[in-house]
Image (cartoon, rainbow, N blue to C red):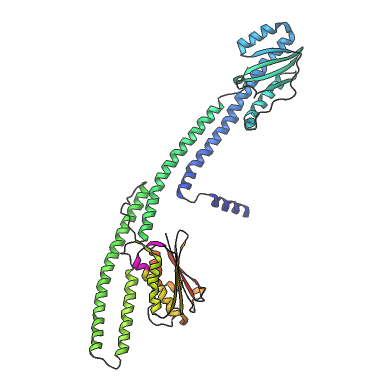
Amino acid sequence: MRARRRIGQWLRRQAPKSLFGRSLLIIVLPVALMQIAVTWAFFDAHWQTVTARLSEGLAGDIAWAVESYEEDPASLPKLAQRAEDSMGLSVALQPGRALPGRRREPPPLLEAFFAPIDRSLDRALSQRLDAPYWYDTTRYPAYVDIRVAVRGGVMRVLAPRERAFATQGHIFILWMTVATVLLTTVAVLFIRNQVRAIERLANAAEAFGRGAESPAFKPQGAREVRRAATAFLGMQARIQRHIEQRTAILASVSHDLRTPLTRLRLALALEPGPRSAEMKADLAEMEHMIDDYLAFARGEGGEALEAVGLKQLIEEVSQGAVRAGAKVAVAADEGLTATVRPNALKRALANLVMNAAAHGERVELAARAHGGGVEITVDDDGPGIPPEQHEDAFRAFSRLDPSRNQNTKGVGLGLAIARDVARGHGGDITLDRSPLGGLRAVVRLPG
């Protein structure tokens, strides 16, 4: 049972991973197996049988020539003429000669082809001849050389090759090979055309997930693929309408909420009181909370993608941490760029940087090329987050243990917004232990 499981695992590892490879395997493998089976059946049941019968017929003619010569040596000229006219055999006596010591071996590449012929001919000659004999099936392209020991020397018989075995086997193999190549080519072209439609659908879905547009995408391919593509286009249109409606509603909510806040701020400025400072702080916190709520709900899906220099972008983001009193170090590869939504990425990095500055005194930002994309790290020397709580930190409105909540500003949306932005670009954000002793946030984006 364990061996069967290991074999199954090995076969799964060796099997193609792509739809094109698996479809090709499903179509081509049965065709190849069928061709191999037909070829094997042809050679086993037909070609070898025909060759054996031809060899037996040739051995019988040679036995007749040897017996006729042994009965009347003087009749050799008439015998040779009759063999030439009626049987296509060239018969000659080599007086005083002896049989060669050993047969000439065929070339290694042709040994597998000539072995069945030699076995068939040797079996037929041994059954029909009592005298010693020798033969060679490889010396001459069109003839088989057979020699038999007789009185006074050796009788040499040159027989046409088609008298000894079926010579049309290679034509059958050629036709089978041509048919296999033709069927495989048709299968490759057909499958490739079908898989290309699925690849276009996958690329369009991936682009839509990153917020990019694919206006040239149209349903193509088989009926099921076209149905899936049509369903995707319908879903894309519904999601875009939902985003537009939500953005319009949030813009209205933002305006409606900020208006009373502005009136309250103005009233406090006109009528200062002993608790004005506390009330202004509460208003500022409410305004900050509204900004966080709106940013989390709105996202940055409407912003266009563009190539930006990451070094300049993270230097701009780091200024917020500097103003917060943290010691900031920035390192980025020169000329490193990424195709992103600049404001969205800037907001995500600002959330990470300000989070690091709020919990530590030192902040380090770095950007580098990584695995065909880019990687941005934000390190701090704060108390950090236990590994088992890393994923919890990304949940909306999540506030962790008191060591990471020394500041009361915010509603637990910073990391959630940052990850939402990263995943909207086709990347992700993960947390880890920082070399500075605190928390490291790793932003990975595709190239």
Q: Position of residue 319 (x, y in %)?
A: 38, 75
Q: Is residue 417 visible?
A: no
Image-based side of 257 in relation to 25, left or right: left
- In the image, is residue 338 part of the stretch drawn in magenta? yes
Q: Position of residue 439 (x, y in %)?
A: 48, 74
Looking at the image, is 227 positioned above or below residue 344?
above
Q: Residue drawn 42% across and 44% down?
A: 192
Looking at the image, is 176 positioned above or below residue 246?
above
> Most extreme residue toward the bottom, as rendered?
274
Tell me where residue 101 sits by quadrant: top right
Looking at the image, is 441 positioned above or below residue 285?
above
Image-based side of 266 in relation to 169, left or right: left
Q: Is residue 60 visible?
A: yes
Which stretch is magenta? Answer: 334-345
Looking at the image, is 427 positioned above or below residue 296?
above
Q: Position of residue 266 (x, y in %)?
A: 23, 85
The image shows a total of numbered marks equal to 0
Q: Residue drawn 58% across and 27% down?
A: 46
Quadrant in the picture for the N terminus: bottom right
Report the front residue among 420 and 310: 310
Q: Residue drawn 27% across and 93% down?
A: 273
Quadrant in the picture for the C terminus: bottom left
- In the image, is residue 300 part of the stretch drawn in magenta? no
Q: Position of residue 413 (x, y in %)?
A: 38, 74
Report the front residue among 153 and 253: 153
Report the front residue among 67 and 363: 363
